[in-house]
Image: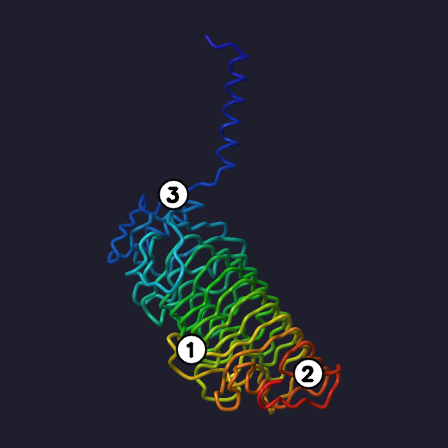
Amino acid sequence: MCNKKTHVLAGLLYLCMMATASATPSSGNVSNYGAVGDGVTNDTAAFNLCLTYNVICWVDPAKTYAVGDVQMKNGNRLIGLGTVEYGDRTAATASTRPILVGVAGSTNVINVSGVSNSAAIDGLFIDCKSSSINGISGGSFQLSIQGTTVVDCAAGLGDMAGSTYTTEAHIIDATFGSNQRGISNPTDSLIVNADFANNSGDGIYLGGGANSNTIVNSRFEWNQGYGVQSYGGTNNNSISNSIFDRNYKAGIRLDGVTGFTISNSVFTRNGRNNVAVDQNAQVYMSGAKNVSITGGLSLVGRDDGGTGTYTPAYVFSYDSGTPSTNVTISGFATAGLFNSTTNPTGSFITAAVEGPEPTSGYNVSGVNDIADTGNTVTGITAFASGG
């Protein structure tokens, strides 16, 4: 027979077990809810069931899941059981991570617009296979994206219309490639160790209100728009320790921004289109205010293999119609061969600056191809062949 003491101990043990169970997030595998992973069967319902009944949903590697508008909720974690792959790949070449391909007629592969308090996507390969489907929707708050690649979508994150914003996101060790646009309208977000390559538009688009982003240790290369375009009234964004290489337009466009810092970054071979002078530059500014550019490097070059046109023609390009003000440039080195006739030794960019430079609050120091200036000047003349 059990005495009273035994009952008390049993009760305490039960309560302890219940407390432990309640403290452990529920988890499940999408395959347990009917996901097939053959790349043909629509597995959306299985993903949604798993995310409805669990906090964490695991996705098996080396399988391809056809899904559309998967609904993530507050606290959900959608995690792929695979090894991280970087670079511009497709569903046909990715093998170690689970692959999510878009179902025709979907708006997004994953819809996170219902996330208002934290969710995470980790270790997935998303291939929309359609320029009309977004990879991951906008509209979330405190979303974490890590170890994930998004390719062949309209917008890799967000939407092309720029109507939604992704707020307080952490985007780490991620690749956005061969989309129409890599990321659209993050705000108050942290982007670290990310790769934006071969998108048919911009790597990152910052529209009005996409403010206070920190972008660190990232690569922007061979995008057919700008590496980063900040347009229409953004405030207080920062880029550091990043590389802008062979983007078809300028590496960075700052149009109507107030407060933007660029530091310790490398700009090489941007302006590949070589069409308009404002695009044939490393950095283009129009009506920009309170801009700081420090510790950078500007190089020119051609396509890989020595083909194509040497670009850019200019390091900095200023819009003639809308002047910029309060621009500080310091510790920025320029080098490289642009024109073999006027600059045969390849010591400097042929012309460092295009367009009328700021006349208010312009400060240049330690830039080897632009004369040093005081805080306010009437403009400086770009050297014809360096020096």
Mark 3 or mark 1: whose residue is earlier in sequence: 3
State the residue at coordinates (71%, 80%): 363
Report the quarter where the C terminus lies: bottom right
Q: Is residue 49 left or right of residue 378?
A: left
Residue 224 - label = 1
> What is the count of numbered marks?
3
* Disc 1 residue crowd, few under 14, some 14–19, many 20+, Cα 10 Å: many
Can you give x and y, in whole percent of width and height, for residue 224 in the image? Answer: 42, 77
Closer to the camera: disc 3 or disc 1?
Answer: 1
Q: Is residue 116 above or below residue 160?
A: above
| In front of the other: 344 or 365 | 344
94 displayed left or right of 230: left
Residue in the image at 49% along x and 91% along y = 341
- Pointers 2 and 3 in contact (C-beta within 8 Å): no
- Give the residue furthest to the top: 1
Q: CA distance from mark 2 to mark 3?
A: 55 Å
C-alpha separation, residue under disc 2 versus residue under disc 1: 28 Å
Q: Quadrant of residue 32?
A: top left
Q: Secondary structure at mark 2?
A: strand
**Which residue corresponds to mark 3?**
28
- Label 2 vs 1, first from the N-terminus: 1
Q: Is residue 34 left or right of residue 286?
A: left
- Of 361 and 110, the residue lying toward us: 361
Identity of the residue drawn at 61% across and 89% down: 383
Q: Give, as a three-letter code, the residue at label 3.
A: Gly
Q: Earlier in the sequence, mark 2 or mark 3?
A: 3
Which residue does the numbered mark 2 point to in the structure image? 325
Residue 348's place in the image compared with 28, above or below, is: below
Residue 101 picture location, percent across and down: 32, 61
